[in-house]
Image (cartoon, rainbow, N blue to C red):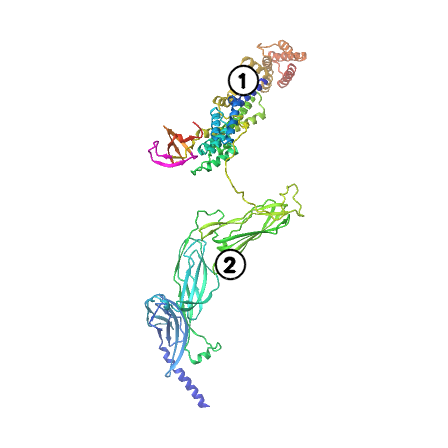
Amino acid sequence: MARHVVTFWIFWIVLLMPAGVWSQTDITLRLDRTEATPSDVVRMTVHVSGSRTADAVPQISGLENFEVTRGGTASQVEIINGRMNSGLTYTYFLQPRGSGTFTLGPAVIMREGRRLVSNRATLVVAERSPESATDKPPVFLEAALSTEEAFVGQQVLYVLKLYHRVAVDSLQLELPEAEHLQFTQLTEPQVYQTSVDGVSFRVLEVPYALLASREGTYALASSRLRMNILQAGRRSRLDDFFNDPFFKGPRSSRPFTAASDPVELVVRALPREGRPSDFSGLVGSFQLESRLEPMPVTAGDSVTLTVQVHGKGNVQQIPDIHLPDIPFVRSYGDQPVLEIERDRNGIGGRKTMKWALVPEKPGQVNIPALQLSYFDPQTETYRPLKSDARILSVLPGAAAEPSGKKPLPAAPAGNGRQKKEIEQVGEDILPIHTDAGSLAAPSGGLHGWICWLVLAGPLCIYVLLWFCLKMRERSPERSAQIRAKNALRVLKKRCREDTEGCARYIDLLRDYLNDRFQLSLGVLTADEAEKIVLAQGAAVETAKHMRLLMQRLENVVYTGKRDRPAAVARELLALVTTLEKEIR
Amino acid sequence: MKTFFRFWSAVWIICLFAPALPAEPDSASMLERFYEANKAYRDGLYEQAVDGYRRLIDDGYTSGHIYYNLGNSHFRMGALGHAILAYERARQLIPRDDDLLFNLSYARSQTIDALDEDGSSTANGFLGIGSLNMREVFYIFSAVNMSFFCVLALRLFVKSEWSYYLTILLAILITIGAGAFLLKWYDWRTDDRAVVLADEVAVRAGPDPTDTVLFNIHEGTVVHYERSEDDWVLLNLSKEQRGWAPAKVIEPIIPR
């Protein structure tokens, strides 16, 4: 037993003894070949010996001109001639982007604070020779545009085809990017077999629709398809047996990137000339269908007007059509439904708009034509899409007609008849006028003197009339008449304004009598005043009152007796008012 | 006051009917000649019809309907230029006649030159007076004018509130009427349109048959007449297209 224990410990000591060698750490960069072509994939390994761990991945110089794919990391422990070596291997797959001589490395790695630097390796990438039919690489990618010139909004097909003779997997596509250009994948990738110049290839085809939102020249860079090329192992007699899937293990693969050739697309702006006002940016090929059902309909019931616009193109731009107001019909619009379809020929679809129409009256209702327009890139013209104008026959129904409104014309039996434009079948002038009545007022030129008479006559007559009236007002007789007419008004005004006392009222009364009766007697006495008013037809009492009042006022003047002016003024005005009434 | 109203009524009647007075003589003879010309037209004797209508016009019966019939007669004879000229003259007198507008439009459609000449003027846009003839505009203005001064004269005697507001209203109307009348008169005075009467007329750079031909115009085309020099007239189609043509093949729509 003790012997077995000793043997075990010796084995372990022997096994662990080479650990002292680890202090000898090294880093090596290797390529699997020194010459290659752009379609080759070169394997590069960076081996760090003496260690199975590292602080970080190696930093490798000179990889700028290669598509680099990491192949993983492997650590090894090996004992050779009793000497144990350990190491860490980083694997990379390089695909040259062009031809030339390239220096790869050094690889630098940090380990336990030490900076380890590898060797450099040189790779010569030869120019690819012109391909003959049989020189086609086993894997290549092609990109094609359906047209090289298009209009804004027009869809262009961009088809990628991967030809391969070897098995590939883990495909990753990288499409070119361009501003104002949108890629839309149309279908799932299709796989089929084809023959290129007698060589059989499997083809993986992916169609895309390109849609440019602005005019310009778009240089589309290469599309890149990353993949793993599966490499077959050595074949032996047992291969057939082990080919059974049950025995199939993982096959080795090598990453590869296939790039298509760049393409160019010229996008033109839509023409301004002839652009309809209702154009919404719809480009492609479209049709419009409409239907009205059920027909006929009863007043108060609903009928559905369906308008569907369908076709190929940028269907998102199909506008929502507006249904104008229809007299005596209530309309309720549904939310438009847009269905987009993609197939190998591009993007298409349909937009369906529906209105529920409820006629309020029996009779015939004209449903107007609905219209929109689109741009047809094939003919490079704007085209209208117009639905048929329809006639809805409305039968009398349970729904009562709105009172007081005249019903529409009665509908003919059956469905409404399609209206037809009146066609002009001939042209001529209309006949002569034979009605002599139309000649009753011969239309000679307007005679000059008549014109002037009609135009200036009223003005002249008016001016003449005005002048005569003014002149009449200025004559002495007229002045006296005016004074007589205004005598009472003047007296009232002066009585209100004059506050000097009763002594003044005698003058006012005399002025009134002189003006009113157009006298020129100057200072009237009380007796004279009485006689005058009696002569003018005043009552005796009034005349007597006049005389007494004047005598009283004269006494005030000559005796200096004071009186109440307001009371005197009231009495004076009352007397004169009575007098005016009596002599009128 | 009664005397005043009698006076004004007399003035009104005289002024309204005075323009019609000079056209009354020999109306029986005029009607007879009118019917004869119509009969000639119906019988297909278009030259005779043209003569009949022309004589009526020369005698002072410048009715729009006679011009219209004259235009029809010319049209039947194939004289498109004369037909358009007669229609245009008729339009000055009966601008709202539907038959006339139709025939004028149809005659214009037969011309060779593609010119957008519809005879529109600045007056058409103002209160629709383009659809009235000169006499109608004058009558309207005269009526408003006389009404205004009647009310004004009335106010010399009766100063009531209603007469005040009526005066204000008529003052506004007389302003509008005066504007319309002046505009119509201006259009009529400045209407320089003329019609090409020959089949084809070479418009030259100068008033001489040896001058360079600038462009050709055809029968029925309406041009603008600028001035005349000897037997030549300077006409224009636009500011860029001007030239001289023989006076005998161009006739103004409104004779000057």
- Which chain is indicated by disc 1? A
Q: What's the residue type where badge 2 is placed?
A: Glu
Residue in the image at 40% along x and 30% along y: B248
Total marks drawn? 2
Residue count near mark 2 (Cα–Cα under 10 Å), binned few <14, some 14–19, many ≥20: some
For the residue labelled by badge 1, is the local secondary structure a helix, a strand or a loop? helix
**Is B208 situated left or right of B82 in this image?**
left
Q: Are marks 1 and 2 on the same chain?
A: yes
Residue at the spot of label 1: A469
Residue at the spot of label 2: A341
Q: Please, is residue A561 above or below residue A285 in the view?
A: above
Q: What's the residue type where badge 1 is placed?
A: Leu
Q: Please, is residue A422 above or below residue A23 in the view?
A: above
Return the x and y of residue A470 as percentages of the image width and height: 53, 17
Q: Give the label on residue A129, or none.
A: none
Residue count near mark 1 (Cα–Cα under 10 Å), binned few <14, some 14–19, many ≥20: few
Q: Which residues are magenta?
A: B202-222
Viewport quadrant of the C terminus of chain B: top left
Q: Is residue B39 magenta?
A: no
- Which chain is indicated by disc 2? A
Q: Is residue B212 magenta?
A: yes
